[in-house]
Image (spheres, helix red, strand yellow):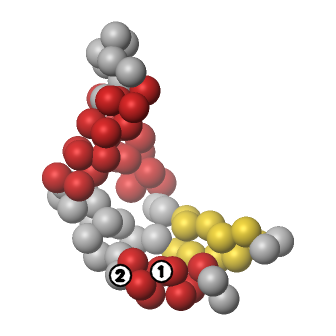
């Protein structure tokens, strides 16, 4: 499981989630692993990446409702 420690900020009307570099690298690694098989469609690659992220409970500590409230401020 990947524990994320995002910081949220808004700049010029856009919302951003800032991650520590180590966490970014781990997510990047998980996404790259899904691109190893080139014959898969982009949709299948994305579905596989999302399954891996879900399996690792990557975003389990983020409250979706609270996040939505924060980005809509």
Res. 35 image quadrant: top left
Q: Are marks 1 and 2 in contact (CB under 8 Å)?
A: yes
Q: Residue at x 47, y 80 (%)?
A: 67
Numbered circle sitting on residue 37: none
x and y, in percent, of residue 56 in the image? 19, 55
Tell me the number on the disc at residue 67.
Answer: 1
> In the figure, is residue 49 to the left or right of 65?
left
In this view, the residue farthest toward the right is: 12
The quarter of the displayed image where residue 34 is located: top left
Say which of 12 and 45 sits in front: 45
The relative height of residue 69 versus residue 41 in the rendered view (above or below) is below
| Closer to the camera in the image, 11 or 48 | 48
Q: Is residue 70 above or below residue 37?
A: below
Which residue sits at x=78%, y=74%? Answer: 13
Asked which secondary structure carries label 2, the reply is loop
Residue located at (46% from left, 71% from top): 6
* Mark 2, other Cα within 10 Å: few <14 / some 14–19 / many ≥20: few
Q: Residue furthest top?
A: 39
SS for callout 1: helix
Residue under pointer 2? 63
Classify the position of the N terminus by image quarter: bottom left
Q: How far, Cα to Cα, is label 1 from label 2?
A: 6 Å
Give the residue displayed 66% in from the left and 70% down from the top: 15
Residue 30 visible at all: no
Mark 1 packing: few (<14 Cα in 10 Å), some, or many (20+)? Answer: few
Residue 59 at least partly seen: yes
């Amino acid at each position: 499981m990947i524990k994320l420690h995002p910081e949220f900020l808004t700049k010029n009307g856009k919302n951003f989630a800032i991650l520590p570099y180590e966490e970014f690298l781990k997510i990047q690694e998980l996404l790259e692993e899904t691109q190893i098989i080139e014959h898969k469609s982009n949709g299948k690659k994305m579905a596989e990446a999302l399954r891996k992220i879900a399996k690792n409970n990557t975003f389990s500590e983020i409250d979706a409702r609270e996040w939505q409230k924060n980005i809509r401020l």
